Image (cartoon, rainbow, N blue to C red):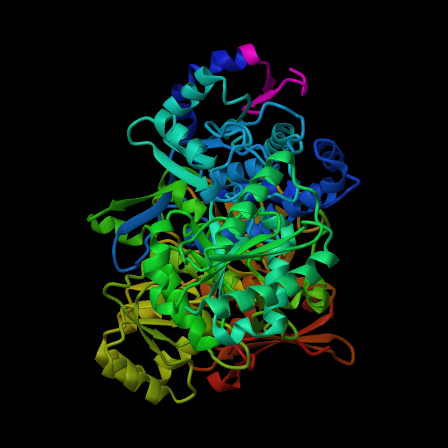
């Protein structure tokens, strides 16, 4: 099929006859498509790719879509679409409306309970778009995709620009709009991005259907998985084609419709029983001024700007100005003053000429008002060129204006606000309140009770903030259902997400581009947008100088929630465990703060103590408050257990230890288990300061094996020497790309760790990919011309001498040869000669370097407090290179 075909069906362009045939099977198609979940991350990735093209006038997509719009409107409309489809905007929308960036996942809202909740698609969602707003139709489908629905868009059939401001929605009758319901669907953000549910009248007309088809086809093409394309159908036909409209609505689980009362009524008649009708109908807005605000020239100028912008074509444009008075003289005097301000602003903003129908309605309303002047009810103020008019009316009942810079001015004392406006509650949207802080607070409550959904300052009625609800609701929630699973089997206590038991997560392709190192990250911070710099953390500096990392508050929250899910999988039980947070705190180091947040999100019991130097005080608190679970660095916990061995052995209440930043050796684990009665020793998280949490250890994982936090990151494992992927299961450099992060987004970041993918299914039942950590690049040091791996040194001491203390390597220059001193804990250290022999036998590079006279190897037992540790994190510095 060629792209000249009018309809788009699951990525294929088709003609009328084929579309009619496929419509008959729409219900069956929904059952097949909805059986496959659509991860929001897939939608975000495709939207981000299209957004980049729309922001580039040189791109082929920009050129194609611009051809479907009037020349004057192409650039602003495509720029607004680019902003609306950006990853940052859509992630914010997901968090605000559905509570997180992965709302489709069945996770536990409260870690104490094995109850799982998620947002599920409503099903087959039909969008009946307006014919006067090119951007609304595709953006509404994007919202449907974010909610996981199968989306069928009915858009206008003609490519001819409309000039009547009308809609092709069913029942609108062309350009007819019920006068009381306002001019047309709403646009509340200017300058800003159009939101689905808002009609962008900045680009009236245009080839609405062609633009929607082209944009949604590009969106499907940007998704290599094909999941987006199979969830999008666009049909371009007139509402008079009743049989097609009935076929659409008959299969629908929800119908989103724009238009006036007639359009909504027509859609309701076609909707089957139980179908959710989502109305994005016409609305009316007004301003309310206190006595002081009504005498403020700046306020009146701002109000006049609201009237003139977009010719009152937005639902958020003011059609009525209410005064806090009952005195007709005050009313008429104000109307005269406001007319002067409106004249000034209008002169600075030349008004386009209304069409014949609009001029007729303006004349009718104006003449009726003039006739009622003789009864003392009204007074009319107009421009000589008829470009604006102020209609003062002593009756407070809300009445829509004929638009095009036509404003009613009415009296309404504040005590009567709710009672007077409530009969029009179905149509109310925006109220601009002019007054002091107390006035705004009190009057906001009054207008909300009357049915208003948003209050703004005077002068910003048409502006919006990112993530603002529309007509009192969030669109994504109207396109979704909240679902839940309650599980009582104790086996579910370590299951954080039910989806992980079903299939591996769908991963977007790894990004292209060069690898990023720590130096590049630090350089990029200099140009980071301050809007994305909310939280500052520094690394512990165990492998070099401390590095700075910056997060937004939303990024931090997203990461802590993901890490909390991982902690459940590791065996932490928020309902029963009493946790002591003994990570290091201060100096902008993030471990203590992060685990405080993680435990808080699990609703767990915790003692936020931090790693204090007085071990006796810490141990006393653990015993006094019944702590049975410890969180901290292995080196600190090891010191604590040995410094307070008698007290902790006698207490015998520490059952679980969750560690981070370092590893316990097998021998150390044996000591904690056999001497102190610890039952569970497991990694609390695998992560870094700059990337955040990267992985978690489930109850079936041993040693350095972790599941990847694939909700947050994409992992590549590259050859140690070349920038190419390693074969499955082979060791390589770990390269992460952060996806769930709107601020300091790191792509293809070479973290400095070595690891390998662990093949096969995990015994815990999760299909989330696993990796085994194999150490850091810094664990390999070149000494005496040979490369010596720190972990091989530790393993040789463990396996040959059953040594279970800490190990530190110190490399120093020498007069004739370099020296390597291996420091051991004197409490557990074997005879130095035996240790040297074990190292020579277990690490052949050391023996060879010594035999060739290139290295002087020494073993030195030291007291525990003599080990060098990083000041911020307390981590053991495994390799100290003094050369």
**Range shown magenta:** 1-17
Residue 823, given in percent of the width and then of the height, sits at: 55, 78
Residue 713 visible from this viewpoint: no
Q: Which residue occupies 39% across, 61% down?
A: 447
**Residue that appears at 26% across and 67% down:** 577
Residue 9 on the magenta segment = yes
Up-down: is 620 above or below 455? Answer: below
373 relative position to 428: left or right? right
Name the side, left or right, on which 414 lies relative to 859: left
Residue 859 quadrant: bottom right
Q: Quadrant of the C terminus?
A: bottom right
In the image, farthest residue toward the left:
488
> x, y percentage for residue 319?
52, 53
Of 328 and 280, the residue lying toward us:
328
Residue 568 visible, this orientation:
yes
Name the image quarter holding the N terminus.
top right
Q: Position of residue 23 (x, y in %)?
A: 46, 17
- Asked if 676 appears above or below 12 in the picture, the reply is below
- Residue 544, quarter of picture: bottom right
Instruction: Check if residue 12 falls in the magenta segment.
Output: yes
């Amino acid at each position: 099929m060629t792209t000249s075909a009018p309809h788009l069906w699951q990525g294929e362009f088709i003609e009328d006859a084929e579309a009619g045939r496929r419509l008959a099977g729409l219900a069956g198609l929904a059952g097949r498509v909805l059986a496959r979940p659509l991860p929001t991350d897939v939608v975000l990735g495709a939207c981000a790719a299209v957004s980049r093209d729309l922001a580039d006038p040189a791109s082929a997509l920009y050129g194609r879509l611009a051809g479907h719009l009037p020349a004057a409107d192409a650039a602003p409309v495509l720029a607004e679409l680019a902003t609306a489809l950006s990853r940052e905007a859509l992630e914010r929308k997901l968090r605000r409306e559905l509570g997180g960036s992965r709302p489709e996942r069945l996770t536990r809202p409260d870690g104490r309970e094995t109850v799982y909740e998620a947002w599920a698609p409503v099903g087959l969602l039909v969008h009946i778009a307006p014919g006067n707003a090119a951007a609304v139709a595709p953006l509404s489908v994007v919202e449907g995709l974010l909610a996981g629905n199968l989306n069928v868009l009915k858009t206008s059939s003609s490519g001819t620009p409309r000039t009547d401001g009308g809609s092709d929605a069913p029942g609108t009758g062309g350009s007819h709009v019920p006068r009381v319901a306002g001019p047309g669907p709403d646009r509340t953000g200017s300058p800003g991005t159009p939101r689905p549910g808002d009609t962008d009248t900045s680009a009236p007309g245009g080839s609405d259907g062609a633009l929607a088809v082209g944009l949604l086809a590009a969106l499907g093409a940007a998704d290599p998985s094909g999941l987006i394309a199979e969830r999008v159908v666009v049909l371009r036909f007139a509402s008079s084609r009743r049989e097609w409209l009935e076929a659409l609505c008959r299969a629908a689980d929800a119908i989103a419709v724009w238009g006036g009362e007639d359009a909504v009524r027509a859609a309701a008649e076609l909707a089957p029983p139980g179908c959710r009708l989502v109305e994005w109908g016409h609305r009316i807005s007004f301003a309310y001024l206190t006595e002081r605000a009504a005498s403020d020239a700046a306020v009146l100028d701002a109000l006049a700007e609201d009237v003139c912008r977009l010719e009152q074509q937005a639902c958020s444009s003011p059609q009525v100005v209410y005064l806090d008075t009952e005195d007709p003289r005050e009313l008429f005097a104000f109307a005269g003053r406001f007319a002067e301000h409106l004249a000034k602003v209008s002169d600075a903003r030349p008004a386009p000429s209304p069409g014949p129908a609009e001029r007729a309605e303006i004349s009718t309303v104006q003449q009726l008002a003039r006739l009622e002047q003789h009864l003392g009810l009204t007074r009319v103020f107009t421009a000589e060129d008829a470009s604006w008019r102020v209609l003062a009316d002593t009756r407070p009942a809300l009445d829509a204006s004929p638009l095009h810079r036509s404003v009613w001015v009415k009296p309404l004392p504040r005590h009567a606000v709710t009672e007077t406006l409530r009969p029009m509650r179905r149509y109310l949207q925006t109220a601009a309140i002019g007054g002091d802080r107390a006035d705004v607070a009190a009057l906001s409550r009054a207008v909300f009770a009357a049915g208003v959904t948003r209050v703004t300052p005077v002068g910003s009625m048409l502006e919006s903030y990112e993530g603002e609800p529309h007509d009192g609701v969030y669109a994504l929630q109207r396109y979704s259902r909240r679902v839940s699973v309650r599980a009582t089997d104790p086996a579910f206590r370590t299951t954080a997400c039910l989806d992980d038991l079903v299939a591996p997560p769908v991963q977007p392709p790894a990004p292209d581009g060069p690898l990023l190192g720590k130096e590049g990250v630090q350089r990029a911070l200099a140009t980071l947008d301050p809007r994305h710099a909310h939280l500052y953390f520094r690394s512990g500096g165990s492998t070099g100088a401390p590095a700075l990392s910056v997060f937004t508050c939303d990024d931090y929250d997203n990461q802590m929630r993901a890490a909390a899910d991982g902690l459940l999988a590791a065996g932490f039980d928020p309902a029963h465990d009493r946790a002591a947070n003994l990570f290091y705190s201060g100096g902008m180091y993030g471990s203590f703060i992060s685990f405080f947040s993680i435990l808080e999100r699990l609703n767990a019991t915790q003692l936020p103590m931090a790693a204090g130097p007085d071990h006796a005080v810490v141990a006393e608190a653990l015993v006094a408050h019944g702590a049975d679970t410890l969180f901290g660095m292995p080196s600190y916990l090891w010191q604590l257990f040995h410094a307070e061995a008698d007290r902790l052995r006698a207490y015998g209440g520490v059952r679980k230890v969750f560690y981070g930043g370092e590893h316990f050796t097998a021998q150390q684990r044996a000591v904690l288990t056999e001497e102190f009665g610890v039952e569970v020793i497991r990694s609390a998280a695998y992560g870094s300061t700059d990337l955040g949490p990267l992985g978690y250890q489930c109850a079936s994982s041993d040693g350095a094996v972790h599941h990847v936090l694939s909700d947050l990151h994409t992992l590549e494992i590259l050859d140690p020497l070349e920038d190419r992927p390693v074969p499955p299961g082979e060791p390589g450099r770990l390269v992460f790309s952060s996806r769930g992060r709107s601020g300091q987004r790191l792509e293809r970041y070479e973290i400095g760790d070595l690891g390998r993918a662990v093949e096969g299914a995990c015994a815990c039942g999760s299909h989330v990919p696993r990796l085994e950590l194999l150490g850091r690049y810094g664990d390999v040091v070149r000494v005496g011309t040979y490369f010596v791996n720190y972990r091989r040194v530790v393993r040789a001491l463990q396996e040959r001498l059953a040594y279970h203390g800490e190990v530190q390597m110190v490399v120093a220059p020498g007069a004739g040869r370099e020296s390597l001193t291996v420091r051991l804990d004197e409490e557990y250290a074997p005879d130095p000669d035996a240790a040297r022999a074990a190292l020579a036998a277990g690490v052949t590079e050391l023996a060879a370097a010594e035999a060739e006279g290139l290295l002087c190897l020494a073993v030195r037992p030291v007291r525990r407090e003599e080990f060098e540790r990083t000041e911020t994190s307390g981590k053991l510095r495994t390799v100290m290179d003094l050369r």
